[in-house]
Image (tube, rainbow, N blue to C red):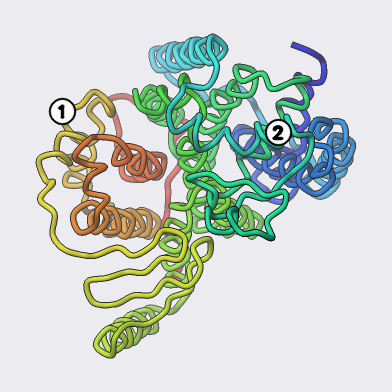
Amino acid sequence: MSLGYFLAWLLPWFAGTGICLAVGGGVRDRGGLAGAAGSGFLLGLFLAAGISCLVASSDTANAFSRAAPWLAAIAMLAWLAAVVFRGRVFPALLPAPMHMGRRSIWWILLLAIFLRLDVLFEEALLRPTFPWDAWSAWAVKPKSWFLLGHHVPYESMQQWLAPSATEIRTAGVWNYPELLAWVQIWFASAAGGWNEPLINAAWTGVLGALGLASYGHWRVLGIRPGLAMLLTYGLLSLPLLDAHAALAGYADLWLAAVFGMAVLSWLRWLQRREAGQLLLALVFAGCMPLIKLEGAVWLLAFSVILVLNLLPRRWRWMLVAVVGGLACIGIALGGFPLPVIGLGWVHMAWAKVDIPLLGTLDLYWRPVGSEMLSVLFTLPNWHLLWYVLPLVVVLRRRVLVAERAAGLVGLLLLACASFLFVLFFFTDASAWAENFTSSNRLILHLVPVVFSLLALLLADVRLSGPDRSARSIAPTAEG
């Protein structure tokens, strides 16, 4: 591995962490640096991808050398701002005081996480991109751009066949978002060639960043170190997440991580009113449609819950009633258009939804209940997650109702789960449930948010013996 490839990892991490520390605050809290470092890794990679797109579209093979000076300058400015405006940015890095037995378990879990990430990293380095969707959908654009030496547009088959078409290309997934493609260009140019194992190793970095961000943000939110580490291990040990890191190339792990980080920053703002964390939440949420088309739906759900939370209670229900009434009237009159960022103008009608990038979805009942139950409860993808979640929700239902943050996250997950229910049971996407393919991948997008909900619900659960590191999570006033 060359120095350039090493810097391709270090520069985005350094820049993104500096931005998160300068903007996000909370640098003196236990977990603040870990949260910034985890979120900063993805933020820095997206920044590197954006700069590469701007300055290296005509010379993709040298994207790293063209974009790296800009990224280094941003990193230095961000860390300077963090030091000037935030003061001491290095809080205590060791875990808070704990009972000796709990501290031992904490270190054992941390060691197990490092060993798992090391195995996944080595696994990703063993082979090129697995020849399935990762190869045919997500690697085709960046590989063609890199080997051509410059960016070329991908268009639909009809435009590609037009007599006026010159240098354009087409593919079955020509309309997929391209942020992840430029991340791959960044690593390929740093490695000096289209070396798929070195490019795909970034997927393990994303998994590690998700764990680091989750642990750090949970600690700032007041989750005890033992519980935060246990949940982090549970998240990173899920078989399907690990498979997406080992058989790298899909966008689903990236989308899951970004969605999870958006919600974590939002929770920081809900509890502590850190304006910078709200800004980071909006940035991460805005990146979702740039990663995968489904990100547009998660952005819509997140935006609706965020806006409703900002309104006074009486205005919320009035807005819901007015929007629901207008939607019913619109459907009765033949349908209505709905603007969705990343998907365009979606036309909603009775028993039919028209999406410009996907076509027309006919809505009628598909009986795939047994397949979906198998996806969640019998296949070896999730350990015991979907057994544990409803049990915790039932046992901690009072917290779900009383704690504002937990209730909002639960409402967000309910909105997302409702979309998946309609998608799998009322559209042709039921075929994804029948053959156990994309149904698991779409559920994967919500899993980091599910673990944040579990952290909030279990925050005040006490085991025997005192825990001096615990902090209360008090609901903030209505906004």
Residue 175 horizontal side relative to residue 459, left or right: right
Q: Label 1, on which residue?
A: 378
Q: Residue at x 50, y 48 (%)?
A: 292
Answer few, some or many: residues within 10 Å of disc 2's Cα (few below 14, many 20 plus, some between 14 and 19).
Answer: many
Percent from the top left, x then y, of residue 373? Answer: 14, 39
Residue 389 horizontal side relative to residue 271, left or right: left
Q: Residue at x 50, y 58 (%)?
A: 270
| Label 2 element class | helix
Residue 143 horizontal side relative to residue 117, left or right: right
Given the image, on which type of amino acid does mark 1 rest? Thr
Q: Label 2, on which residue?
A: 185
Percent from the top left, x then y, of residue 224? Answer: 43, 33
| Label 1 element class | loop
Q: Vertical placement of 101 versus 17: above or below? A: above
Please, which residue is most extreme toward the front here? 163
Given the image, on which type of amino acid does mark 2 rest? Ile
Percent from the top left, x then y, of residue 331? Answer: 28, 83
Mark 2–mark 1 CB contact (< 8 Å): no
Quadrant of the frame with the N terminus: top right
